[in-house]
Amino acid sequence: MLDKDLLDQLKTLIDDRVTEQVVLASSLDDRPKAKDMKEMLDEVAALSDKITHEVRNDDERKPSFAIERVGSDISVRFAGLPMGHEFNSFLLALLQVGGNPVKEEEALLDAVKNIEGEHEFVTYMSLTCQNCPTVVQALNAMAVINPNIKHVAVEGSLFQEEVEERRILAVPTVYLNGEEFSAGRMDIADFVGKLAKGGVSTESFNDKEAFEVLVLGGGPAGAAAAIYAARKGIRTGLAAPNIGGQTLDTMSIENFVSVPYTEGPKFAAGLEEHISKYDIDVMKNVAATKLIPAETEGGLHTVEFEGGGSLKARSVILATGARWRTLGVPGEQDYRNKGVSFCPHCDGPLFKDKPIAVVGGGNSGIEAAIDLAGVTEKVTLVEFLDELRCDDVLLKKFQSLPNSEIITGARTTEVTGDGGQLTQLAYEDRDSGELRTLDVNGVFVQIGLLPNTEWLKESGVELSDRHEIVIDNHGKTNIPGIFGAGDVTTEPFKQIVVAEGGGATAALSAFDYLIRTSVPA
């Protein structure tokens, strides 16, 4: 089942990090995946005398298996074969249940330990979904930290009846104690924010010494800014919800010069590894809520965070990125994750042999349409303008597909359904004014990005009419000592390589500002 090189790597990890006795307890049926599961578990168990495999057949979901720490209540379960994106989730769960510590901020670990009550989570996931491992790994880790938390990761394709019964049309979808709890990418801090009283505390920030450069945001722009600042030998901090930003939601990256192909989560891991090579105070799982500029030039700016903490810095680089823009039409929120989706790679397989629509005629829209055409019955691309704004090579590719259709000059007005699932998209023909409908089961929204600047509205930082941070060609904002970089700014080209360049520019400009500005007495 697993090749020899992989087994050798697993043995090294297990020998180094598994300190507790672990049982792999399986429940199997007659399907081919069950045979593969038994073979994989037998191979893993053979690597160490600390791991055993027992076929118990005591769980209603078959094939499935639990990873249990002997002599404790700690366990997690996989219903399905965790390969593809989820193999790392299996390996990490094995190591953590086996005694390897969960690597997170101490405040976050304490918050998980303090969650009260019994919590039984079920995550429905797909092996092709790049967001699912984040959710699966977060809940598995929480189950290891707090034995009152239980988690089962269910591979939707193997448990189709269960998925259809619960009308799940987006992954990852999480149920808690039998009720739908969340959908989409979430990490430990997100779960703690919904479960724990008061969320994660950031009050320890108040005791930190002022930074010379404080970077807000952990995407390509923020990572590049922090690295360039740290290389100047100045005290550098980076505070962000995560490291990777939008790249965590990106399936394939083919235009980062010198790297012909990579995937978003892998790229994000590379950013984090590069950051770790420098003396950067990294504060993850945090969100800024307010920026208070210095009263005098050269003074200290203050940034406040959720959780009651604040940081001070002589210069601040704003690299908080952007998020998907929504349609803003009736029914969109009602059917979000019940037909309305923003991730074709994650949710596309759930619409197999069903008609769907993609709204948005730029490159991201037509790339999504091409991807979805391979699994769905028909893809209709709906564009507001009278012509598409995508590259010609992509347009020709889409038009060559037998199940493709393009509608231009169409203003989406509503999405409707039967209460549990989306069934129609309504649009207005902009030329005639006629209202028309499309019978579809899914609508994938690909209409651009919104900058994450709501928290800056009272800061005095100048924003454009599109709510982007206005910067010059040095990354400077209208406030001395405050700089911007990446997709959150007026930089017109929202690309990874451009964002990294913007982050480097902002850091070099911040350094120039610091050496030319005296500190007030």
Image (cartoon, rainbow, N blue to C red):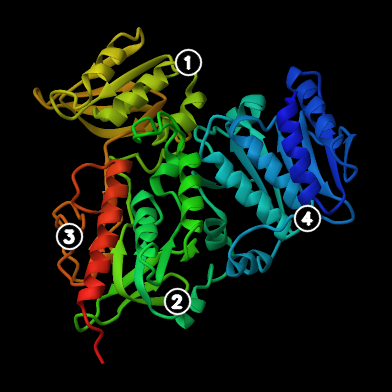
Instruction: Tell which circle, 1 or 2, labels the residue nearer the N-terminal end.
Output: 2
Residue that badge 3 annotates: 463
- Residue 345 visible somewhere in the drawing: yes
Say which of marks 3 and 4 sits in front: 4
Instruction: Tell which circle, 2 or 4, labels the residue nearer the N-terminal end.
Output: 4
Residue that badge 1 annotates: 353
Say which of marks 2 and 4 sits in front: 4
Residue at mark 2 to residue at mark 3: CA–CA distance: 25 Å
Instruction: Tell which circle, 3 or 4, labels the residue nearer the N-terminal end.
Output: 4
Q: Residues within 10 Å of mark 1 (few under 14, many from 20)?
A: few
Marks 2/3 in contact by CB < 8 Å: the verdict is no
Q: Residue furthest bottom?
A: 521
Residue at 41% across, 21% down: 372
Residue at mark 3 to residue at mark 4: CA–CA distance: 49 Å
Residue 381, relative to residue 504: is it above or below? Answer: above
Residue type for callout 3: Leu
Residue type for callout 4: Gly
Mark 4 element type: loop
Looking at this view, is 160 or 461 the one in front? 461
Residue at 37% across, 43% down: 333
Mark 2 element type: loop
Mark 3 element type: loop
